Amino acid sequence: MNRALERLLTEQQNEHTRDIDQTPTLGMLQMMSDEDQRVASAVRAVLPQIAKAVDTIVASFRTGGRLFYVGAGTSGRLGILDASECPPTFGTEPEMVQGIIAGGDTAIRCAVEGAEDDEALGASDIGERGIGVHDIVVGIAASGRTPYVIGAMKKAKEAGAAVVCVCNNPDSVMSKHADIAIEAVTGPEAVLGSTRLKAGTAQKMILNMLTTASFIQMGKVYGNLMVDLQATNFKLVNRAKGIIQRATGAPDDVVERAFRATRGDVKTATVMIATGSSYEQAVQLLRQSGGFVRGAIEISLTGSGKPAG
């Protein structure tokens, strides 16, 4: 038996749920819900570290860098989930945020035995991506000691990339290899042996924060509206038009014309309506503002060629 693993908080038996197997369904769910309430507090406690990671990601993006999530099992799948949702949500290229999981694509759906224990495999998977000084690698593991993830983090650091860890135990092994350690201590799980519960929920919250806050700072959001949304189906077309309308207050017919003129580009349509400009002028205003809707509108109002302030 591995005593070091046994001592981790995520591997302790939860005193509040010892009788969960003998509890009626509603009571069982209340126990789980009570434990879930602790997750938000654990994440809030590490907001300063999350903020540092966001600032580092933004600096990476501004120099053409990429964000890589690396994990095994649930942690790896959560990284892939967050990465895969960035293109439709923020209009990014698929290469900008990538998820890497121990065992490769097969492990997304099925466990690949032994992959998470292979430190050399983690290093190899990072090496294949050509990671360099402009990139940032985020290692994810509830335990904070997964060999595959540690191998990836070490290799990334050797390549000069910024390295972050996201885990759920304090003073983790992974933190020793990270420039920024995000350790959201969620404590014992409702059911011992499944860190896809509280630990996994905390990880998803943190990854959502990392990408969302970073892309807000990259001009992908105006107010609290996603203006780089990709309108790729009926639901998203209607959502995109609704965002344009909320951003500009324009009537349906004006929104429809702008939407068609820009071929569904929410950001450009918003600037067109807000500034009374043509498609070509809106594109130029956005280019001058670095892709920020607010900056493009300010440039149009001031005529200065750059945002006010």
Image (cartoon, grey):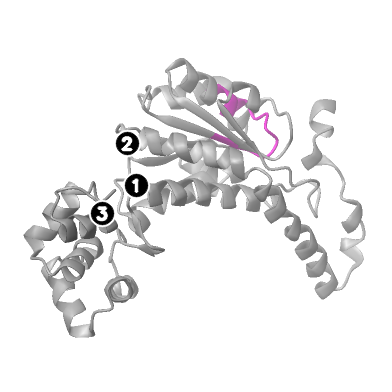
Report which residue position mark 3 lands on. Answer: 295
Is residue 129 shown above or below 300?
above
Q: Are marks 1 and 2 in contact (CB under 8 Å)?
A: yes
The magenta span reads 139-151
Q: Amino acid at mark 3?
A: Gly
Residue at image point 68% right, 25% down: 173
Residue nearest the observer in this picture, 254 or 141: 254
Quadrant assignment, res 285: bottom left
Q: Tell whether position 105 is magenta.
A: no
Viewer can see residue 111: no
Of badges 3 and 2, the one in the foreground is 3
- The dot on residue 62 is 2
Q: Earlier in the sequence, mark 3 or mark 1?
A: 1
Label 2 crowd bin: few (<14), some (14–19), many (20+), radius 10 Å: few
Which comes before the other along the chain, label 3 or label 2?
A: 2
Q: Amino acid at mark 2?
A: Arg
Q: Is residue 304 left or right of residue 56?
A: left
